[in-house]
Amino acid sequence: MSAEAPIKLTHNEDIKAAIPTLAGTIAATFNDPANDHFSDDDNQFLKFHGSYQQDDRDLRKTGKKYIMMIRGRIPGGVMTAKQWCVFDELATKYGNNTLRITTRQSIQFHGVVMSGLRPLVAKINESLLSTLAACGDVNRNVLAPPTPAYTKAREQVFADAHKVALALAPQTKAYHSIWIDGQQLDNDAAENKNFVDPLYGKTYLPRKFKIAFAIPPVNDLDIFTNCLGFIAIIENDKLVGYNLAVGGGLGRSHGNEATYPRLADVIGFFTPDKVVDVAKAVLTIHRDFGDRTDRKHARLKYVVAERGVKFMQDEVNQRASITLAPAKPYQFTTMQDLLGWRKAVDGSWFLGLFVNMGRVKDAQKTALRQVAEKFPNIEFRLSANQNVILANVSDADKAAITALLNAAAVKTENQASVLHAASMACPSLPTCGLGLAESERYLPGLIDRIEKICADLGLSSEEIIIRSTGCPNGCARPYIAEIAFVGKAPGRYQVWLGGNASGTRLNRLWKDVVKDPDMETEFRPVLTRFAKERNSGERFGDWCDRVLLSN
Ligand code: SRM
Ligand code: SF4
């Protein structure tokens, strides 16, 4: 009988097991002023604390300048006006004077140097928000519907999202010790060495874990791309329960067919009193069955794809002590934010503000800060489409906010063309270490070029959801867009086509490489055919799926 080969776990698993508080030597590194960067292992631990070590890739030719990215944990993207002021000030004082609204309803700071990192994180905590578990092998920022226009039940759904976010937060005391007390934990002390998180265990999850709540018919946070989705079922404006969706995720690698984007399966219905139990059940399935030997195969989506829906149903039933009922009927019809002034269901006003590529800067940043200072009772809500919603605005304040924003040249109506309004890009260069091509700095110009073609063809008012990422990881959720540009190399992009308006269909690879100068040559003939051949009212993504990609 031959002995079985020992299983080789990834290096991340080894370091989590060795320091289960996740303290690394982060505080010790801070406490030596000669340090300008962290070790590779500490860089892995830092992620759990909400921070990534990066270097400014625009400056690489002249040397390496270390900078940090810090991501907030902001459940459902809801902030008070006071918290917005704190974030605004921190971006100016310690970051690159921009606030980057992320595709998961959070805010990232870029360009922070080592000395600014600790004060920045401490101030976020003082404002009663956090950065713990914004990144790392844990549950990430929980998404919840931001728009107050549709149903009063949104409040209940948001409350559930908040409850789930709290219940799934890691319990390590290292976070407080490093960022608030400025102390390095003794990693050899028995209580730290033997620390076991009550939910995550000693080695946390094999990989990141993502949760979203959505209320049909609005899928403004792309629920099916999450590991775990709660689809709210609303009857007579009351939440009656959730359809459970499991196993979504988008990350893939060029040239590696074993990695792929996947939409979640809807596996049953349960009542809202069980929402935390179900969240813990799905998370611990990932904890127990996710692949810890290969980080490219470690997401929950591969467990669901390989073990199947019945396995997931049985495990959820057993772990949450429930019996999932058959999923209730639901339909999604849109993924987009409502821009401009609108009435909320409670009679107040809200303003959907377009943020180009999620980057709040310059006049828009200054004006939003003024709004936050002058109107302390309004809420700032971040959308998963990288926009900002000013909510809870009274009749009396609406005109004053409009005047203030307009005086700063920030539009409140007709803010962006249909194509720009429906677009998203990931940051990529110069901050993201994984970017293979430009994204945030490239997409606006490319959309202008596509718009020119659309105008020539009488398609000016046609909404087409266009997204770009600098690499195949999928941070701006390109694989459900109607057109997606996925970076391969500088100035070269894969083009994916055929997503739909509701985020319920994956698109498909159309061209493996299109070079930047060839974009018009490639797109004009396709858009010309679309204008001529489409059925009445048919969207570009639907036409691509039905005709172009099916020929
Ligand atoms: Fe992401 C890694 C930015 C949402 C899939 N993502 C990164 C890093 C941290 C790069 C790194 O590991 O060194 C990027 C930081 C760049 C920078 O300079 O800021 C980064 N991801 C972002 C953000 C800021 C993009 C944006 O335009 O807003 C989003 C932050 C969300 C948040 O607030 O938590 C962001 N990332 C996503 C999403 C979309 C989502 O979650 O809805 C995805 C696809 C969904 C999914 O997870 O499957 C996504 N990011 C990835 C992956 C691929 C994971 C995989 O399964 O293979 C990586 C790479 C990795 O984890 O190794 C990654
Ligand atoms: Fe970086 Fe790739 Fe994510 Fe863009 S998609 S932010 S390039 S990891």
Image (cartoon, grey):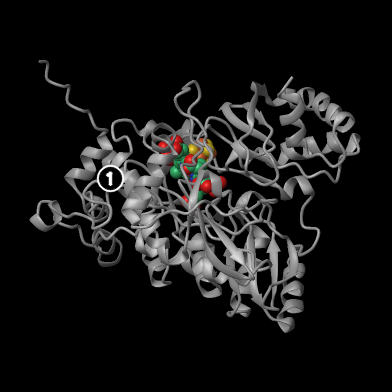
- Outermost top residue: 1
Q: Residue 248: x percent and y percent?
A: 49, 42
Residue sitting nearer the eye, 11 or 499: 499
Q: Which residue is mark 1?
A: 42
Relative height, residue 228 to residue 481 (above, below) = below
Relative height, residue 206 to residue 218 (above, below) = above
The quadrant where residue 469 appears? top right
Label 1 CB less than 8 angstroms from ligand 1:
no
Q: Amino acid at mark 1?
A: Asp
Relative height, residue 62 to residue 19 (above, below) = above
Q: Is residue 490 visible?
A: yes
Name the residue: 66% across, 51% down: 332
Graded by Cα atoms within 10 Å as few (under 14), some (14 to 19) or many (20 or more), the crowding at tag 1 reads many
The quadrant where residue 300 appears? top left
Q: Residue 535: x percent and y percent?
A: 86, 35
The quadrant where residue 545 appears? top right
Relative height, residue 290 to residue 189 (above, below) = above
Say left or right for 148 vs 431.
right
Q: Is residue 430 visible?
A: no
Say left or right for 221 vs 443.
left
Name the residue: 63% across, 44% down: 503
